[in-house]
Each structure stands twice: as structure tokens, then as C-alpha cells.
Amino acid sequence: MTWVTPAPTMATPLAKDVIAEPATLRKRKGNQCELEAKRSKQIEKPIETPISELPEDAQLLYKLFSAMDNVLVLMSCTKSRPTLPTVRRNVELASGRDLTEDRLCLLLAVAHDLLEAVWYGRGSTAVLQIHQKDQKGQPYLPSGPDRAERLAAFRHRITFGGKYAPLTLPPRPDSPHEVEEAKAQAARRAESLKRIQDDEEKAAATAALFSAARREREGARARSGSTGKSSLGQLRQGAHHPLSSRPPRTVKASTLPC
């Protein structure tokens, strides 16, 4: 009789990944990919330098930008016009540092897409205002998270952005009346300069005539002086004198009284 070994009744234990469902495997692999991506981003992300370890100029710019962002938000909430004199005064009070024109130009250069300076009006009544901009370049009021992102972006720029060339503030737009007045003033100034130039040329010509006349008189005086000296010498020597040609007078002895 032939004996046949029966098949084992217990299944051979397999790995958990092999007996798992395909959906679970895909989900697990997706989570692992996300973790690896996050780790790679953390490794590639540059380490932010603390504000206290940045150069003094960078610390000053960061402090001024933070103060300006807060001031502009408060002024927008109170419906106040963010004119440059008002913004400068409040920023200096909040930061304890002076917001000079050079610092303002450098601040606008670093925050070129976060802040902008715009003139409203024309002529002497025009005012320069500072506005906050969004990613599309439109004025807006940033919320709490937006302000944190703005500060982080500005900090990243002053840390890794290198050197920025200061911007120049936009020129004040002139009104049509002021343009015409400026043209009239320029014409009057040109006419006055031409009149002064003509007077100077006339004075120079007159001085030249007087100088020529003076030289002529001096030459005539010199010639007359030399002629007078030669005549006086001739008189002293007796040459060509009418009395010198007469014979000497003689007195006869018979005519003398006894």
C-alpha cells in the first residue's frame, strides 16, 4: 500500500506587506513619499539667521519694515490717509529710529512688491502716500497670517538677497498751471541773462575804447615831450637863435666923455 503525505492544514506565514490589500499599500507608500519629500525640503531649506546676528543695517531695515507694516494696518483700520509725513512720524515712534529719505528708499527697494509710494493729486497740493501691496501688486489690508508671511519674506531678502540699490522716490506731478508758470519763469530768466550779457559786452567795448584813447593820449604826450626837450637843448646851445647872428657891439674911444 502506498502512503501519501497529507498537505499541511496551516498556511505558511507570509510577510504583512504581501497579504495586505493593494489600497493600503498605495496609501502607505504615499505617506512614505510625503515624509521623504518633507525631509528633503527641510534639508534643502537654508537655515534662517537670527535677527540679532544680522548686520546692523539689516536689523534696522527689518525693524523699520515691521513698524511700517503695523502702522499702515492701524491707519487703514482707522480710515486715515497714509501720507508720508504721518507714516514717518508713527514709524519713528514705534521703532525708535529715524526714517530718513535714504532709509526709506532702501526699504522700498528691498520691499519692492510689498510696499509702494504713490502721489495723489498734482502740483503743490499733491501728497505722497505709502501703501501695502499683495502678490498681484494691488493695495490691500494684510491679515495676521499675511503679515507673518510678509515679515518672513522681508527677513529672507535681507538675509540671502545680497545688496540692493536704493530706489528714488517718484517725482511730484506738476499741475498744468504750474507748468505754464515754470515755462514763463524760464523765459523771463533767459531774457534777463541775455540782457546782462548784452550789458557786459557793451561795457567791455566801452572800456576798450577808453583804453585806446588813453594810449593815444599817452603816445601824443610822449612825442610832444621829446620835441620840447630837443628845442630846449638847442636854445641852451644858442644854435639857430636870431640874436646869435648879430655882430658884437663896439664902442669907439672918441665918443667917450672926458
Image (tube, rainbow, N blue to C red):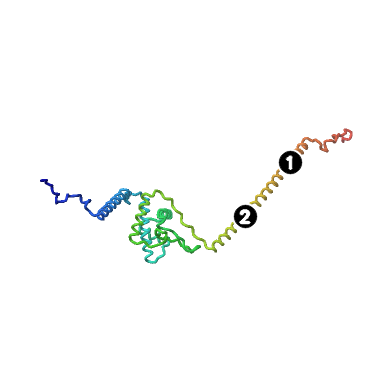
Q: Please state the horizontal and vertical placement of residue 13, each as a whole percent of the image.
A: 17, 50
Residue lying farthest to the top in this orientation = 253
Residue lying farthest to the front in this orientation = 1
Q: Amino acid at mark 1?
A: Arg
What label does residue 194 carry, if any? 2
CA–CA distance between discs 1 and 2?
44 Å
Q: Which sits in the foreground, 241 or 43?
A: 43
Q: Please state the horizontal and vertical placement of residue 247, each as a whole percent of the image.
A: 85, 34
Q: Is residue 133 above or below residue 209?
A: below
Judging from the image, what secondary structure is the residue with disc 1 in? helix
Q: Which sits in the foreground, 153 or 225?
A: 153
Q: Please state the horizontal and vertical placement of residue 127, each as a whole percent of the image.
A: 46, 62
Q: Amino acid at mark 2?
A: Lys
Assess disc 2: are there few (<14), some (14-19) or many (≥20) residues with their C-alpha within 10 Å of its C-alpha. Answer: few
Q: Is residue 192 left or right of residue 30?
A: right
Q: Residue at x 33, y 59 (%)?
A: 145
Residue lying farthest to the left in this orientation = 1
**Occupied quadrant, residue 62:** bottom left
**Occupied quadrant, residue 83:** bottom left
Q: Residue at x 77, y 35 (%)?
A: 237
Mark 1 touches mark 2? (CB < 8 Å): no
Residue lying farthest to the bottom in this orientation = 79
Q: Please state the horizontal and vertical placement of residue 1, each as a whole percent of the image.
A: 10, 46
Residue at the disc numbered 1: 223
Q: Residue at x 49, y 58 (%)?
A: 171
Q: Residue at x 55, y 61 (%)?
A: 179
Which one is closest to the eye, mark 1 or mark 2? 2
Q: Is residue 32 left or right of residue 135?
A: left
Earlier-in-chain disc, 1 versus 2: 2
Point out the image quarter for the C terminus.
top right
